[in-house]
Image (spheres, rainbow, N blue to C red):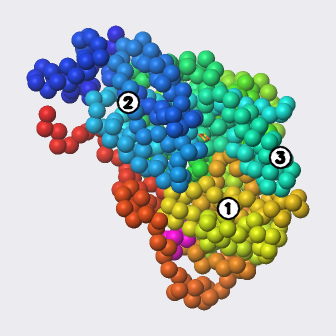
Amino acid sequence: MAKKTPALRSAQWFGRDDIYGFLYRSWVKNRGVPQDQFDGRPVIGICNTHSELVPCNSHFRAIAEHVKAGVLEAGGFPLEFPVMSLGETLLRPTAMLYRNLASMDVEESIRANPLDGVVLLVGCDKTTPALLMGASSVDLPSIAVSGGPMLSGKYRGTDIGSGTNTWSMSEDLRAGRITLKEFHEAESCMHRSHGHCMTMGTASTMASMVEALGVGMPGNAAIPAVDARRNVLARMAGRRIVGLVGENVTLSKILTRQAFENAIRANAAIGGSTNAVIHLIAIARRIGVDLRLEDWDRLGRGVHCLVNLMPSGKYLMEDFYYAGGLPAVLRELGEAGLLHKDALTVNGATIWDNNREAPCWNRDVIHAQKKPFKKNTGIAVLRGNLCPDGAIIKPSAATPELLRHRGRAVVFESIEDFHRRIDDSALDIDETCVMVLKNCGPKGYPGMAEVGNMPLPPKLLKKGITDMVRISDARMSGTAYGTVVLHAAPEAAAGGTLALVETGDLIELDVAKRKLQLLVPEKTLAKRRAKWKKPKPPLTRGYWKLYVDHVLQADQGADLDFLVGKSGAFVPRDNH
Ligand code: FES
């Protein structure tokens, strides 16, 4: 039984002997809760993103039950509540449009309710940042529990990975290398269990970030969704959150600058998704850490990719777990002096205490720092007249020969323009060209869609071309690959130089020098700028309007400007 703590926040609701105490307790008792649950024990919210519209989180009812069991075992009182859930596969136009909306739901649901601590159930890409952003703005003791990756896809004797092989098979179909029957068969083979994408895409990256930040339990990143040990982790998180409340370890004591720096290096070491850049900056700005684009470039330099996982390599998350998972990677980073070893984690130990003896069982899956899978693979932050506020590229997913390239721009004014023209055999394009896509940034799309890895023209695919330089203000799926420059800021729809590029202009990319330059004289650009007209947003009311009016650029995490920072757990104007 947890000790009665008068300072518990929930006592403002359940610890009262007046009319309000009556109504707070009485209504909760309507499902059979006995009086002793209101004796001053910590009330733990289980923030659930279960939804049948979010296939990656469809097993979260079961996970929540394991968290509840842990909370009860530790003497807490669990109360599960739903929040808006976001799935990558079904939501239109893009789940990212709603990340900030979901974070508002999470923030207000936590603050407005009688909670002392929270367990955040996260899985599909945007659910992790949305819940961490919302929880950061309240700053109660919090633990994130990821739902875990799906089992490896199995197709005709080979492993196939979500997203990564979707892209490659779609290109094979377009190039006539596979039949429609084979394409349909692969659909059934790819996703065969509960869980999120099992490549090192955004969901697996963010689950790894949860562990590297110390806001999840050790092992959080990779235990498969259907492995019994995922349930054990959920149960242990349920037990531990009660202790965190007792120790008053709020989220801001975990999410420190050191924690974010550890996560950035871990992201480089796992060949993680470019989406982590936006999400971590957004979370940091909520909790009060001034994390910038430059931090990614500075901290990622000299960090090698240790993990041979799709999309950068060949294995999948299940292999990663059996090989040792993120603890084996964190140990390598720590031994190389690339970890803030004292960073506190939610289990009460430091990140180094948790990982210093982590074993590695397969060096083909998790390489040693001395013999990395790929060298120097941190996110590169580019600057130049095309992106004065920055753009990023993931060198580990790019073709090395294209990392220094000068080519003729072929411009697509919007994603619709791209779809209209890309299959046209008359399109004037060859493999030396630079494909430029505009108006797919935070305001332009709106929601900053994952369309930056534009499919190549079929006529070049048929020639055997597999990669070209592509530039946009969009994002890219964490499961995708290629020499793709993303997140150009300011975006085209905000009047960035990207809006002024015309087909035929020369563009120079030099990743080693961190440069992205439109080779057009400033005078010409000024004339084009004078003629430029801001594109009209597709909807001008409701949440879409709120979003377009207030969304920040990618370099600032694409949060809504009025959501940056935190209000804390205090409820103003509480007249009860
Ligand atoms: Fe949910 Fe990939 S679709 S993680």
Tag 1's secondary structure?
Answer: strand
Provide residue 278's location: percent of width, then percent of height: 54, 52
Q: Residues within 10 Å of mark 1 (few under 14, many from 20)?
A: many
Provide residue 157's location: percent of width, then percent of height: 85, 31
Q: Nearer the viewer, residue 129 or 254?
A: 129
Distance Cα–Cα, label 2 vs label 1: 39 Å
Three-letter code for the amino acid on which mark 3 is drawn:
Thr
Ligand 1 lies in which image quarter?
A: top right
Indicate whether residue 494 is drawn in magenta: yes
Residue depicted at 37% across the width and 38% down the height: 139
Three-letter code for the amino acid on which mark 1 is drawn:
Val
Would you name the residue on which mark 3 appears? Answer: 179
- Asked whether mark 3 and ligand 1 are closer than 8 Å, the reply comes as no
Principal SS element in the magenta part? loop
Q: Is residue 136 visible?
A: no
Distance Cα–Cα, label 3 vs label 2: 45 Å
Provide residue 253's location: percent of width, then percent of height: 42, 36
Would you name the residue on which mark 1 appears? Answer: 485
N-term mark: 3 or 1: 3
Range shown magenta: 488-495
Residue depicted at 83% across the width and 60% down the height: 461
Three-letter code for the amino acid on which mark 2 is drawn:
Phe
Q: Is residue 482 visible?
A: yes
Tag of residue 81? 2
Tag 2's secondary structure?
Answer: strand
Picture quarter with the N terminus = top left
Q: Is residue 561 left or right of residue 404?
A: left
Establish if 403 lies above or below 189.
below
